[in-house]
């Protein structure tokens, strides 16, 4: 039987092992609570494990809702503030199944988006180049987006000063070593045009990225407060490469 093409994009769930681990921990804790209560329901002795189990369950559900709803909403809001002309060049570094590349391409009808990844399965459910390509096709953005296999721990396959906008979503945290994250951040700024804008969204280490960007002498370095639509809450770090203004930004950061 031929499977009909999907009408809507599907971007998967981030950190699936953690989501499943929290769900499993919730189940085990509730069973432990039942055991402590002697199979009679919620008594004082079973109360602690029930509460801990509920916390784990809520954490797991919040991560699922954050991936499916909160993250797309966050990126739409962040990109809508960028006052793009529509003909810019943009990079989505660590694109996964292509959410940010699609949102960029929708705002750049006369522009071009490059999207790079190594497509690690443990970072996102169904993570693959093919899944990203399918999402580009169902959203009608495929002709403006090029996917590339490239590792952020190595030099990027783009010349200096190539992009007006570089976006990184929940990806720098995947690099375990501080030196790797610093080097990746340097590469991301190398490929930015003078006046170009870098936007990093992450749930961890955003103070570190902020200080690296300041040390690299980028202008307008701003780290937002926590966005609670993603769990754990995410922060947005924005910065501009010194030089001629390439994109403008408006509104709250
Ligand atoms: C949590 S997913 C986020 C994907 C996408 N940016 C989004 O927000 O939907 C993290 C992504 O980083 C990618 N990644 C991890 N390490 C990487 C590396 N060294 N170079 C390039 N991409 C990497 C993973 O393959 C994965 O697609």
Image (cartoon, rainbow, N blue to C red):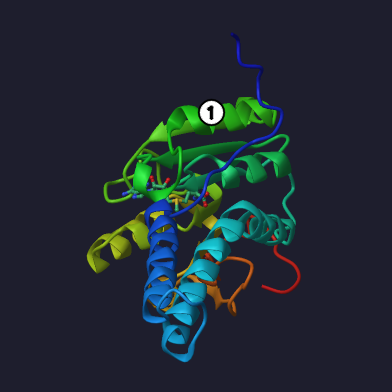
Q: Position of residue 162 (x, y in %)?
A: 49, 44
- Residue 216: quarter of image: bottom left
Question: Which quarter of the image is occupied by the N terminus?
Answer: top right
Is residue 193 visible in the rendered image? The answer is: yes
Q: Is residue 110 left or right of residue 29?
A: right
Q: Nearer the viewer, residue 244 or 191?
A: 191
Say if 55 sits above or below 15 in the image. below
Name the residue beneath numbered marker 1. 133
Q: Position of residue 144 (x, y in %)?
A: 62, 30
Q: Which x, y percent locates residue 126?
A: 45, 37
Residue drawn at the location 53% of the way across and 28% of the way down: 133
Left or right: residue 17 compared with residue 80:
left
**Label 1 SS:** helix
Residue located at (46% from left, 71% from top): 56
**Could you tell me which quadrant the C terminus lies in?**
bottom right
**Quadrant housing residue 48:** bottom left
């Amino acid at each position: 039987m031929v499977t009909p093409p999907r009408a809507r994009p599907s971007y998967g769930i981030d950190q699936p092992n953690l989501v499943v681990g929290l769900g499993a921990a919730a189940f085990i804790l509730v069973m432990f609570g039942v055991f402590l209560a002697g199979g009679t329901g919620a008594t004082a002795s079973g109360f602690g494990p029930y509460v801990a189990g509920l916390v784990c369950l809520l954490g797991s559900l919040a991560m699922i809702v954050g991936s499916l709803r909160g993250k797309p909403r966050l990126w739409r809001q962040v990109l809508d503030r960028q006052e793009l002309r529509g003909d810019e060049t943009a990079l989505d570094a660590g694109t996964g199944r292509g959410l940010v590349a699609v949102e960029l391409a929708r705002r750049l009808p006369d522009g071009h988006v490059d999207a790079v990844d190594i497509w690690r399965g443990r970072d996102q459910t169904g993570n693959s180049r093919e899944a990203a390509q399918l999402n580009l096709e169902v959203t009608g953005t495929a002709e403006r987006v090029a996917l590339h296999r490239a590792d952020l721990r190595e030099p990027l396959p783009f010349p200096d000063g190539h992009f007006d906008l570089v976006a990184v979503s929940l990806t720098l945290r995947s690099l375990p070593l501080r030196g790797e994250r610093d080097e990746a951040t340097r590469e991301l700024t190398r490929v930015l045009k003078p006046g170009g804008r870098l936007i990093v969204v992450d749930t961890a280490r955003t103070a570190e990225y902020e200080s690296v960007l300041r040390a690299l002498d980028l202008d307008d370095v701003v780290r937002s407060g926590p966005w609670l639509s993603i769990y754990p809450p995410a922060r947005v770090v924005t910065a501009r490469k010194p030089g001629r203004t390439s994109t403008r930004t408006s509104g709250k950061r």
